């Protein structure tokens, strides 16, 4: 029983974080059909904001808010630097500019801060543990589960009930038509980047809460996770991203418990091979998105 | 067709000038830079055969270079050194020791075989999904190289490769690879693939089996990457898996994209340009570090400048310096125009 609870909490907390990461990526992809390679760097930005403000004596919550705000700012900046100037040109051009922007941010962190890991301040509650039904769990896993439930519900509400959300979904389904009906293209795209930055900022706090330090390359793993989750779930569907995130967490956690120490080093290779198999079976991903329209 | 021969002639002449020029100057440093350039050229032109013709961005290329480098290493490290360089190597492989040239071919074949197996399902994907999975493939290859200690010595540096890559070999391989890339571009597969790059639906309607065409190009690219990896391994003689990861991927993609991914001329031009810029910037970085000894090292400046250059080129010329015509084609066209006006 204790084991089942432990397993469940592990899957849900990891899956919640993965789902949020994937969601931030799909929101951009759904509208622009473009992958944001600089997405992981938004998480890095949140982490370094925490590090840079750690000496200021602000309460932790305020620093956290500041970190999320910085992630949003950099999200919008990504749009202006890497996407807007080349958006109408080839897909490859945008992939490359966002890849270059990601490299730019990483190397700026290397140059101006340090290549070495930096400590990030965390409230005590992140390092405490509780016992539920005999399973000992770190409180941060429960926080992650709670945060992901709240955020997923909030995003679902935003997308379904508000004007902004409906306009974003309209733009994702048929961009040209949405524009003709008076949806302002640049505003929608910028808000999608802001939302993506917001999700990245929150995930950054939860993710870095697990590790406790931030390095320039910290965004790579979340980026990969988001990539794989979206490919499994279906590149264009928001529910797909969430399903993909939880499925990937299930695969990862199962491998963690079943693989021997020798094989555990190859866990990533196993996970990705499994993903290739899923794609062989369903090249479109598990859940199909809205009918594809023309890109900007 | 005539302009293709002209292109081949000009590109090979450029390679010859680099090779002979660096020998005449006779400075050890320039010799190293020029050899490095020619090896990069092999890799970038290899990537061009896939990326330029299919229009799909591939991140996995450097992973196949790594496979080639390790294959050649395992096959050529002298038997008496293997105990030290690769202590956990399987027994039957401890006695294997073949000539570096043969090993280079084996490196290409191994990379191509691995590519043939893993890429078959991936080639059905288009657009972003294809790019993302190629990124995942790079991570898989890196993870395997980093952890298969028996064959790669794990994350530690592998040493003891015989230094057999000299300037002439690098130049010959680079010239052959340029010829292969040009020939592939004009072959039936290459032409159909380029048609699918321009319009996937129309090409498929004309009967092009797109996944299969892409698969062939991907195998060829991996084969060339494997050869390039072996060439590099025997040049540098000691390396670790992290030599085949994101930083190098960024570098070769920068070279190809700034030059122009659709043409072999672009691949060559980009490689030459970026190598010169990279060495210049690294020199500046080293001078800055020497001047401010101790207090705050300058790291990452080179990459920042290259990233800015890449974004700028994408905004101004999204197709790179040579977006769709090879150099020979441009020359014959401009001559024909002159004749007309005269």
Image: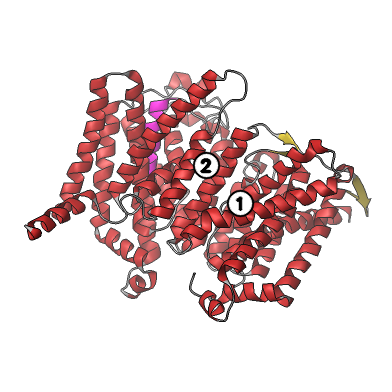
Q: Which secondary structure, mark 1?
A: helix
Residue at the farthest bottom position: A181
Local packing at callout 1 (Cα closer than 10 Å; few below 14, some 14-19, many 20+) is: many
Name the quadrant containing residue B325.
bottom left
The magenta segment is B225-237
Name the residue nearer the viewer: A70 or A234.
A70
Give the percent coordinates (x, y) of residue B10.
19, 42
Name the residue located 26 percent from the left edge and 31 percent from the top edge.
B18
Give the percent coordinates (x, y) of residue B65.
43, 40
Residue occupied by mark 2: B246
Q: Residue under mark 1: which chain is it in?
A: A
* Residue B26 visible to an observer of this rendering: yes
Name the residue located 46 percent from the left edge and 61 percent from the top edge.
A91
Image mark for residue B196: none
Residue occupied by mark 1: A224
Horizontal arrangement in the rendering, residue B10 relative to residue A188 (left or right): left
Q: Is residue A54 above or below residue A291?
A: above
Q: Which secondary structure, mark 2?
A: helix
Residue B230 inside the magenta-drawn segment? yes
Horizontal arrangement in the rendering, residue A275 relative to residue B326 (left or right): right
Residue B190 inside the magenta-drawn segment? no
């Amino acid at each position: 029983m204790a084991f089942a609870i432990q397993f469940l909490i592990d899957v849900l907390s990891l899956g919640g974080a993965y789902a949020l990461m994937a969601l931030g990526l799909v929101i951009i992809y759904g509208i622009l059909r473009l992958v944001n390679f600089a997405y992981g760097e938004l998480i890095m930005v949140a982490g370094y904001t925490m590090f840079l403000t750690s000496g200021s004596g602000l309460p932790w919550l305020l620093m956290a808010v500041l970190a999320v705000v910085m992630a949003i700012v950099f999200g919008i900046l990504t749009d202006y630097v890497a996407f807007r100037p080349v958006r109408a040109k080839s897909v490859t051009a945008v992939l490359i500019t966002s890849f270059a922007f990601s490299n730019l941010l990483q190397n700026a962190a290397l140059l101006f801060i340090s290549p070495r890991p930096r400590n990030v301040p965390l409230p005590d509650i992140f390092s405490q543990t509780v016992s539920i039904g005999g399973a000992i769990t770190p409180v941060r896993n429960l926080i992650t589960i709670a945060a992901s439930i709240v955020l997923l519900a909030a995003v679902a509400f935003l997308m379904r009930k508000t004007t902004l959300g409906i306009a974003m979904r309209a733009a994702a389904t048929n961009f040209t038509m949405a524009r003709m009906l008076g949806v302002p293209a640049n505003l929608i795209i910028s808000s999608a980047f802001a939302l993506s930055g917001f999700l990245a900022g929150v995930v950054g706090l939860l993710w870095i809460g697990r590790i406790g330090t931030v390095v320039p390359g910290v965004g790579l793993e979340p980026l990969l996770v988001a990539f794989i989750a979206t490919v499994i779930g279906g590149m264009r569907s928001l529910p797909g991203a969430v399903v993909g995130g939880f499925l990937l967490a299930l695969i990862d956690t199962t491998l963690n418990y079943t693989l021997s120490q020798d094989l555990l080093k190859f866990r990533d290779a196993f996970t990705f091979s499994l993903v290739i198999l899923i794609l062989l079976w369903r090249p479109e991903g598990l859940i199909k998105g809205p009918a594809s329209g023309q890109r900007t | 067709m005539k302009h293709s021969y002209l292109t081949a002639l000009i590109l090979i002449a450029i390679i010859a000038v680099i090779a002979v020029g660096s020998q005449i100057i006779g400075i050890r440093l320039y010799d190293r830079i020029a050899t490095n350039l020619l090896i990069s050229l092999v890799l970038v032109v290899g990537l061009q055969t896939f990326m330029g013709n299919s229009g799909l961005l591939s991140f996995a290329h450097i992973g196949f270079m790594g496979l080639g480098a390790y294959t050649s290493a395992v096959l050529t490290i002298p038997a008496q050194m293997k105990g030290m360089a690769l202590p956990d190597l399987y027994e039957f492989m401890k006695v294997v020791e073949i000539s570096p040239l043969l090993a280079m071919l084996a490196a290409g074949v191994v990379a191509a075989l691995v590519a043939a197996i893993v890429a078959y399902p991936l080639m059905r994907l288009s657009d972003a999904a294809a790019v993302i999975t190629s990124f995942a493939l790079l991570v898989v290859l890196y993870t395997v190289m980093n952890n298969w200690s028996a064959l790669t010595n794990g994350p530690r540096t592998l040493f003891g490769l015989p230094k057999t890559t000299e300037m002439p070999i690098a130049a010959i391989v680079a010239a052959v690879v340029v010829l292969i890339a040009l020939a592939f571009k004009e072959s039936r597969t290459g032409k159909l693939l380029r048609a699918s790059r321009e319009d996937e639906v129309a090409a498929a309607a004309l009967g092009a089996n797109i996944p299969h065409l892409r698969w062939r190009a991907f195998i060829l690219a991996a084969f060339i990457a494997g050869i390039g990896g072996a060439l590099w391994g025997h040049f540098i003689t000691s390396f670790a898996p992290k030599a085949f990861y994101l930083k190098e991927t960024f570098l070769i993609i920068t070279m190809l994209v700034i030059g122009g991914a659709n043409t072999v001329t672009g691949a060559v031009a980009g490689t030459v340009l970026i190598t010169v810029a990279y060495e210049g910037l690294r020199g500046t970085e080293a001078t800055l570090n020497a001047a401010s000894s101790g207090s705050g090292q300058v790291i990452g400046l080179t990459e920042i400048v290259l990233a800015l250059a890449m974004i700028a080129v994408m905004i101004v010329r999204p197709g790179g310096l040579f977006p769709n015509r090879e150099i020979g084609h441009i020359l014959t066209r401009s001559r024909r125009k002159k004749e007309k006006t005269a």
